[in-house]
Structures are given as structure tokens and as C-alpha cells.
Image (cartoon, helix red, strand yellow):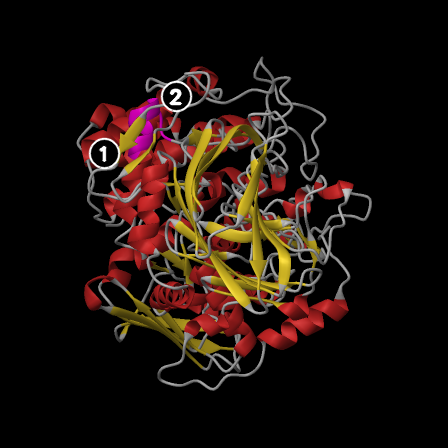
Amino acid sequence: MRLSYVYIAILVLSIGCSQNPKKETADEKLITYVNPFIGTDGPGNTYPGATTPFGMVQLSPDIGIPGWDRIAGYYYQDSIISGFSHTHLTGTGAGDLYDILVMPTNSRFSDRIEQNNYKPFSHFNHNHEGASPGYYWVNLLDYGIKAEMTATSRVGVHRYTFPKDESSQIHVDLGYTLNWDKPTGTFIKVVNDSILQGHRMSTGWARNQKVFFEMHFSKPFTSYKIDDNGKENNSKIVLNYTTDEGEQIIVKTGLSSVSYETAGKAIKQEANTGFNQIKRNAEAIWEKELQKIKIVSNDVDKKNIFYTMLYQSMLAPTLYSDSNGEYKAANDTEGKYKIGKDSVAKALGYNRYDTFSLWDTFRAAHPLYTIIQPDKVPDMVKSLLAHYKETDVLPVWSMQGSETNMMIGYHAVPVIVDAYFKGFQFDFDLAYKACKESAMVNERQIDVYKERGFIPVDEHHENWSVSKTMEYAYDDWCVAMFAKDLGKQEDYEYFLKRSENWKNLYNSKRSWLQPKDMDGKFIEPFLPKEYSPYFCESNAWHYYWYVPQDITGLIEKTGGEERFEQKLDSMFSYAPSPEDKLPVFSTGMIGQYAHGNEPSHHVAYLYNYLNQPSKAQKLVREILENQYKNEPNGHCGNEDCGQMSSWYILSSLGFYPVNPAQGVYDLGIPLFKEASVQVANGKTFTVSADGLEENQFVQRVSLNGNELKRSYITHQEIMNGGTLVFTMTNDSKLADKNQLKTPEVNKIYN
């Protein structure tokens, strides 16, 4: 059941503005192809506002009304804006952040509504709104005010163009709260008639979040009023101005998790020029990032999608440390961790990042970063290790110096192990210690998993017993490979054995991975397509295929290649019936396959392991062309901090990491006739497809003129640069003729 909405009139106008054909030129700006509104409608949960790649600031409009559709603060179908806040999550299912709401007003309009908690608001429409990388603008129609946003890494910059009015105002609201977010302490200080300082402490998904800010105004305010309604968590200030027609006021807001002073320093270091120059700088940064992959295509719509996906792949993780390296250490209000709740840590020689949606991003986003973000990968790994040093465990899903413990697995492990084998530099001994200890804690039912070799069903509403067992087993394989390479033979054997724990839930009589009770008996009755507490946001169909560390073993358990192929065929043909009750995350359906949620993302490529690459190619092309659209409802599911977009980028290039820590990418089918990827040391890796437009299958693949007799390419081969050529055919038998070999299991390619 896909989420769908009817808004054709608005959609046509929006798409019409973003799809004007462009002639390709040598100096073509790729930022013109990015459509930040993709995912702002439907289940995507993205935001359209201004940010920089992996930046601390996400300055974006807030509708001001709570709900699932407005998790990112903005929802394309709405018609009001209640202000612009400085922090947002991209494409998640978690309603948090929305720090420091700013809203300009004047005497033209004073209506209030209960739905947005009686905050100031204005109507708007999409004919008077636009967005591009590093820039957002909208006309606040009720006030006649044009609002523009841009950003640096740590500074949000507003420009408001006012009409003539003696009662123009700028509201700064720290008590503003939405969805899961709740302020616990707020403070505003008027430094002078042009500078404010303050902080907003909050709790929600991220506990004990702290945001300090300094705010500079280009025009002094004539007077002000601070109003907290007698509550420490509801501070707000109204700044009064008299404005002339067309007068502009620029507001610069520096952020820090440590102090007002460092927030102010960010303004002086990063935003000490005018709005237009800051905007140009942000655009230049984005352009440089987008130029890392150049595609050749006559289809403007596909170019819009590709470069928007590349853009969205770089919205998380987000910068967390100040320019001097300081940041609030990972902790919680209960003082659970060894570092006190008010401690300040320091990243020495690297940038500290957070917002690690690891259950999603370990699959494709982090492998993509190892190709196009080699300078940032060590910093991301060091950030994961910093979290470990502060909490004694690697993060599960962390943001703003807080462990949310959302989702399952310990998927910082494959991210670290993948980076290690790909040659990135960090403290290997510390990294191994962090991986091993995170796999040995007694939290999140890992104690039960260690004791029994599986997690049994219990009364918890999100028991997720099968999913946890499967994902822990994969992470165990990653630890085993790390241990083996470091010469830790005993650990290698222990974790390799644990990586086989998925077999303990295999019911050979039914050929399903099935939950067991406390006595080790399979739960009956059992309906594989049912969404039950035994599977994490999925069902038995989705998780059956999640053994990337031992696909050969799964094929054997299933009864051999023929039986495995039959079951895999059924995955994509056994459609839900009309009476089936599907949850919100089951979107992008092809049979039981759900591209809108991450556990399914590798499944189409499993046909490679059956010497049936033509079936993988057909499905991958179908997903690329049907599950991503150049429209607000363009994501078939939550974008999830870069995972959904990274799947598209890698798959459209013709390869994807089924096992994201193995150092290989399974070959699929390219979407473009040519794509050039900038890799390290000034090298270029080019992918081309001969006969792409008139053919739908791959007959053969050659690397640097040599035909590949295998269905994968290694990471090192990509980073060496060169040319990968797909020769296309319309004959599926020719596509399968070469009987390409798949990667060996239990082996790392480095």
C-alpha cells in the first residue's frame, strides 16, 4: 500500500518550473538540476531548506503543525509557514530538533490558529517559493515579506525583505516545539541592539540536547520584548523595527553545542560577508561536491533525480564540533555514561560528526562515502570512536551527542570494518576494541543472543527477535574479519561462529527464518507475510534474504539454487492482497519487496548469485525508473539520512554492495550511457554502456579493456581509476550465458 496524495494542479506547476530543458555545456552548473523538494510530500520526510554538505545548520521552513507528514518540519501539501528553524533531520521517522524558530511579521496580518499553538504564521504557495542547494526562498503572502535562507557549515543566514511598515517585527522563539521535541531550558540575552545570545536545551529523541547561539542583526532593533510566560523552557523575544519599502534585514545565527562565544566565533569565521556572497559560497561548495560524478544523459528528468539524490546523500551525518574541535560529549540526563552530562569533549585533528542513522546508512551511504568522500570517512570513523570513548559502546543511532537506541544491530561495526579494509587511517587498535566490546555488551538483548545463539520472543512490543538475530549475526561476521586480519585468531573463530547464528532460526520444514519461544520452539501459527513484532519494520519475506555474509549458506539451507530462485521469484511476484494491513513503512512494493524500507535494498542483486544476472538487471532498472520521481512525492519511502538516495546513486552507476563491508560491489545495470566519478588522487573512474537506449540487459562487462568473468568489481579497482564498459543486449539468455562468478563468502576484498 503506497502512500499517495492528490495534488495534481500544484504538482504540475512545481514540476513545470523544475523541468525546463537545459543544453549541456562545458561549464554547466550541476546545482541547477537539484530539486530539494523531492521527498517533501508523500513518505520521503525531507526538508527543502538551506544547508551545506554535512553541515551543522539546516535552516528550513516549519509549517508549525505536528504529525508524521511533518517530521522534517515541512510538508508540501500545507499552505502556511510558522517560521524558520535552524536544525532538521532529513528523511527520518523521528520528529526532533527544530531549534531556534525565527519569524518576521508586520501589521498587515495578526490571525492565530490553534493548530500551530497560536504562533505567528503566514500563508504561502509554491508559485512564490523556490529552493536550490544552499538557498531557499518564499514569499510570506500575508505580510508581503520575502524570506530568503542560506548557510555556512555552522551559521544560518536569513534575509528578510520588508514592505513599508512602522510595526515590522522579528520573532525569535525558543519555546517552539514540534512532534517529539520538548524544550527543557531556554534563555535569551540582549547583548546590544544588534546581537542576541541564548541557549535552548531540549529532550526528545535526542536527550539532553544543547544548542547555544549568537544572533547578529544587520539593522539595530528599536525596542524589544522578552516573554517567557513565567516558564524557563518558553523564552521568546520580539524585536521591533520601522521598515521602508524594500528594506532588507539580514540575520546571522551561529550554533554551538558548547557556548555562546564559539557560536559567535562561527559567524566571524564563516559568515563575515554579505548574504549574496555567503549564498555564492554555499553554491560553490555544493557544485564542487556534485561535480564529483558527471553523467551523460539527454533525459533532463533523470538528471534532476540523479543530482538531487547525490545532494540528499550529503545531508547527513552532520557536523557537530566547533571550529576549535569542542562539542558536548555524548551522554544523557541520567548520568548513565562515564562522562558527566555537562562535559565538553574535543576533536583533535578532525571534525566530529553525528546524526548517524546506522541501521539505514551502513548499507549503501557509507560505502558511497568511501568512493566520493574519502577525506571525510576517517573523520566519521573517528566520530564513531569518540562516541565509544565517551559511552563505552559504539553508537546505534546517535544525534546531537545523544544515543537514541533507535532500531537494531551494532552497525557502526560494518562502517568501521569497511573503512579499515579500504585503507582509511585511524586508530586500528581502538577501533577493534570498540567493535568487540560493542558486540559483547549485555544491552539490547545481546546477552540473551550470546547465551542462546538467537533472541527468543518475549512480551516487548518491539521484540524484533528474528531481525535482531539476523543483524547481530552479520555484524559478528564483520568483527570476525577484523579480528582475523589483526591476527586475533581466537576472537576470529568465536565471532565467525556467532555469525552463523541466523541458522538457529531456520525452520527447514517450512523453509523460513522463524521466531522461537523461550524454550527454543518455533512460534506457530506463522504467516510469513504478516507484519509481526518478530520483525523490525518488516516481515519474514523481507528478512529471509538478510544473510549477506553467507549467501551460499542461505542458498544451501533453502534447498539449492533452483529452490532459492523460485523463492526469490516469489518475493517479487507475490503481491499483498487488498485485505492485507500494511504498515506505513511498507511502500515501494514489488510483490513482497518493499523498496521504501532498507532491509530489502540488496535483494534484487541476489540473482547474481544464481547466475541469473538478467533478472537482477530487469528489477534494478524497474526500481530506478519507477521508485524515484522528480516531484515532491518522489521518494517511495523515508529518505533516511542518505540511504535511499545512495542506493540510487550506486545502482544507477551499475553496481551495489550486497555485503557492505566486503570491499566488493555486485554488478547491475547502469542507468546512463556514461558516468565519470572522481576518485582519490585525481583519478577518474568512468562507466559507459554501449547500446543502452535500445537494450535492457547486459551481455558482458569489461574493465580497462579486459572482459570480467565475474559479477562484481572491487573497491580498489574503482579507486585505481579506469573504464568499466557494459555491452548491452536485448537477449536475456546472452546476459546469463557467461555464468559469472559471485564473490566468495567469508572473505574480504582489499
Residue beneath disc 2 = 341
Q: Nearer the viewer, residue 489 or 633?
A: 633
Q: In the displayed image of the protein, which residue is found farthest to the left?
A: 487
Quarter residue 256 falls in: top left
Q: Position of residue 613 (x, y in %)?
A: 47, 62
Task: Look at the picture and state if 634 lies above or below 266.
Answer: below
- Which mark identifies residue 88? none
Per the model, the C-alpha gap separating discs 2 and 1 is 37 Å
Q: Tag 2's secondary structure?
A: loop
Span colored in magenta: 385-394
**Which residue, given by chain and number where applicable, does mark 1 sit on?**
484
Give the label, 2 or 1, closer to the camera: 2
Using the rendered image of the protein, determine whether residue 662 is visible from the camera's viewpoint.
no
The percent position of residue 373, horizontal first and vertical second, equals: 31, 56
Q: Which residue: 71% across, 34% down?
A: 527
Q: Earlier in the sequence, mark 2 or mark 1?
A: 2
Can residue 445 be seen in the rendering of this structure? yes
Helix, strand or loop for the magenta stretch, by majority? helix
Identify the amino acid type marked 2: Lys
Taking 661 as reference, is 593 left or right? Answer: right
